[in-house]
Amino acid sequence: MAGDIQLTAAVRTNLLALQGTQDLISRTQGRLSTGLRVASPLDDGRAFFEAKALSDRAFDIAEKKDGIDQAISSVKVTLDTVNSIDSIVKQMKGIAIGAKSATGTELAAIVTQYNELKTQIDNLAGDAVYQGNNLVNGTGTTLTVEFGTSSTSVLTINSIDLRTASTGLSISSAANFSAGSIVDAALTQLATAVSTLRGNAQSLGSRVALLQTRLDFTKSYVNTLEEGAGKLTLADINEEGANLVALQTRQQLGVQALAFAGQSEQSVLQLFS
C-alpha cells in the first residue's frame, strides 16, 4: 500500500529473528514461573493428555486411600474390643475358680462380681462404635473397603457378635455357685468364649495387616502415578534457567544486529546527501 514503510531484507530478517527470540524468552519465563514444560494441550497435546490421565488415576486412587485408612481404624477398634472382652472373660474365669473354695457368705459377693463383669462385656460391645459402625454387637453391620476403581477390588468385613447372649459368646448369668457342677458349667462357657475371642483376634489382626499393606501400596502407587505425570509435564528448572540466559544473550546480539542493519541504510542515504 502507498505510504507503507518498506524495510530492507536485512532489517526484516533481524527483526523477525528478534521477535522469535522474544517469544522463546516469554515461553521460558513462563516455564520458570509455573514449573511446567507442558501447561496446556497447545504446548504438547500428547504429553498433556497422557499426564492428565495419570493425574486423574492418581486422584481416584487417592480417594480410596482415605477409605482404607479409616477402615484400618475401624478394625483396630474392633480388635481392641476383642482384647478387652478377653481380659474381662479371664477375670470371670478367675472369679469362678475362686468360687470353688469360697464360703456361703463369700459366694453371694462372687456371684455379684461375676454378673457385673458379664454386664460390662455387653456394655463394651455396645460402645465399640467407629463412624457409626459397630462390628461386635451382632447387628449385622458389614464394612466394605474399596481398594480401586474396579467393583471387584474390595474387602468385605462382616460383623461378629461378642455379646454374652447365646448367639454371641453364650455366657450365662450366675444365679449361684453353690455346687461344683454349676461352677464347672460356667468355666466351660468361659473356656469356649476365650477360644472364640482368640479366633476373632487372629482374624481381625490378619485384616488389619492386609489393610495396612494395601494402604502402603496405594500411597506408593499414587506417588508413582504423579511422578509419571510430572515426567511428561514438568520443566527442568536448571535447563530452563540456562536457556533464559542464552536467549537473553541472543536477544542482545539481535538488537545490535538490527542496529547495524539500520546503520547500513543510513550509509546508503549519505551517498545522496
Image (cartoon, rainbow, N blue to C red):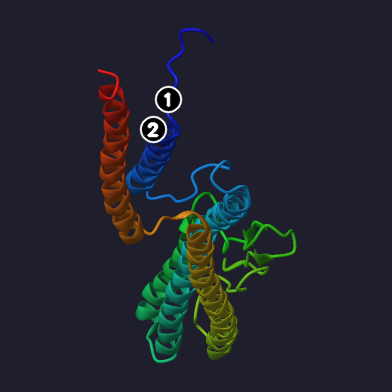
**Callout 1, which amino acid?**
Leu
Q: Position of residue 267 (x, y in %)?
A: 27, 29
Q: Left or right: where does residue 131 sit relative to residue 271?
A: right
Relative vertical location of residue 90 with respect to residue 145 in this rendering, above or below: below
Kindly check if marks 2 and 1 are in contact, taking CB atoms under 8 A apart as contact. Answer: yes
Sort mark 2 into few (<14), some (14-19) or many (20+) by Cα contacts within 10 Å: some
**Callout 2, which amino acid?**
Val
Q: Position of residue 218 (x, y in %)?
A: 53, 66
The tag on residue 11 is 2
Sort mark 1 into few (<14), some (14-19) or many (20+) by Cα contacts within 10 Å: few
Q: Position of residue 149 (x, y in %)?
A: 67, 57
* Residue with the mark numbered 1: 7
Residue placed furthest toward the front:
272
Relative vertical location of residue 40 with respect to residue 178 in this rendering, above or below: above
Residue placed furthest toward the top:
2
Q: Nearer the viewer, residue 200 or 126?
A: 200
